[in-house]
Image (cartoon, rainbow, N blue to C red):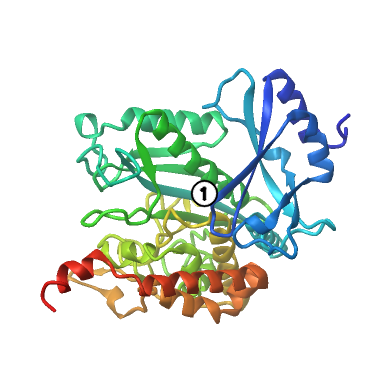
Amino acid sequence: MSDPRNPKVDFVLRTIESRDVHFLRCWFTDVLGAMKSFAVVPGELEHAFNEGMGFDSSCIKGFTDADEPYALAFPDPSTFQVLPWRPQTDAVARMFCDVRMPDGRPFDGDPRYILERAIARCAEAGYTPSIGAELEYFYFKDDTATEVLDRGSCFDLTSLDYASDLRRDTVLTLEHMGIPVEYSHHELGNSQHEIDLRATDALAMADSIMTYKLVVKEMAIKHGVFASFMPKPMNGQPGSGMHIHLSLYGDEGENAFYDPDDAQGWGLSEVAKAFMAGILAHAREMSLITNQYINSYKRLCSDDLAPTKVAWTRSNREAIMCVPMYRPDDADACRVVLRSPDVATNPYLAFAVILEAGLDGVRRGLSLPSPCEVARSRGTHSCQMHESLPENLGEAIDAFKDSQLMREALGEHTHGFLVRAKSEEWRRYQGFVTSWERDRLLAVL
């Protein structure tokens, strides 16, 4: 029998029986954010809750090596959901897992644990983070090319937006899985779309983003098309970002970012300003996490709408961070938005380093610089004088590898793996001859 002191486990076991669930998928991610899974039958589930399920962790990128191939996956009963796109007879459910070592210690390379550790540090400082996300992606005819489904643009409807039904099915599936959706619409690019998730606690949001990506792809397959979260899949079209909405709540449930009496008129508390200053101070160092692929920098450097300046703003798209002013007198609406991350990031690691950077600003009492706004009288942008994000993966590696905060936030294991893996990726890319080079040089040199 299940442990009567754990009602969440009891709920899972009862639901499995009542919903005719015959397969339980245990989900976790590698360090780069790729979803991993294995299935257990219901008869093994109590053992999995109590003892964990052993697996060969040396097969997972960023986990252990062949000399230490043993790890245990412990399902988190609070993440149990029946998969609505699977048959409801002999149904399939999923749970996210925490990865531990054979002696019961949390595994240092488990992205979920890394985020849980950052959340615990927030709690020690008296704060609970609240995070929302705007995620963009493209639909293509198939996975072999970038043939778009429509020529629509931002917020287009009817005949230009052929994917309205597909987005609708995706939103309904997400809501069936307990993931609240705030908005969905056609984005700026041809066949580009966006679905925004309502803010919740940081761990639940990271789990929701991983589920979101799978649901988007599953619904696309169901409709006979392909969905891609590649940051910059096409020339001449915008890239796909993941705007992250952040706020901290205090022990009394108040928004610690809001201060209606802010002397500077921004509506921001001193905590918010220091938190934002911390993110700006570490923005270049954490780009390897928030923008982890070579292609990520094609979005940042060739997309006029992508932010590149390490600054904050209320209206300037060049700045990486903004403070929305939709409802300036609403305490719960007060938040900051980090616009530089892309949809290919590992959300567990991204949230972890962002929270750690903000907390560092709060601990050190960093001062927030003035906002970077559009100087309309001169037709210029005041952001031009600010430092830029790394222009390529090589610069991002250089900023990341020497960062003490990134090392502390991620742990030596994960930090070291990312430096090695991304350095090798960059080395291989630098030696690869592209069609762009051949088209311009082969016939003339």
Give the residue furthest to the left. 444
- The residue tagged with tag 1: helix, strand or loop? helix
Q: Is residue 274 visible?
A: no
Figure check: 10 above or below 195: above
Measured as percent of width and height from the top left, residue 59 is found at 64, 56
445 vs 179, left or right, is: left
Q: Quadrant of the C terminus?
A: bottom left
Q: Which residue is mark 1?
A: 332
258 vs 186, left or right, is: right
Q: Residues within 10 Å of mark 1 (few under 14, many from 20)?
A: some
Figure check: 408 above or below 33: below
226 vs 397, left or right, is: left
Picture residue at 48% right of the left edge, 69% below the top: 288
> How many marks can you see?
1
Q: Quadrant of the N terminus?
A: top right
Which residue type carries mark 1? Answer: Asp
Measured as percent of width and height from the top left, residue 303 is found at 27, 61
Q: In this view of the protein, which residue sits in the foreground, 421 or 244?
A: 421
226 vs 304, left or right, is: right
Measured as percent of width and height from the top left, residue 285 is found at 50, 74
Picture residue at 29% right of the left edge, 38% below the top: 141
Picture residue at 61% right of the left edge, 73% below the top: 416
Q: In this view of the protein, which residue sits in the foreground, 34 or 209?
A: 34
Q: Quadrant location of residue 428?
A: bottom left
Q: In this view of the protein, which residue sits in the foreground, 248 or 16?
A: 16
Q: Is residue 425 visible?
A: yes
Measured as percent of width and height from the top left, residue 310 is found at 39, 73
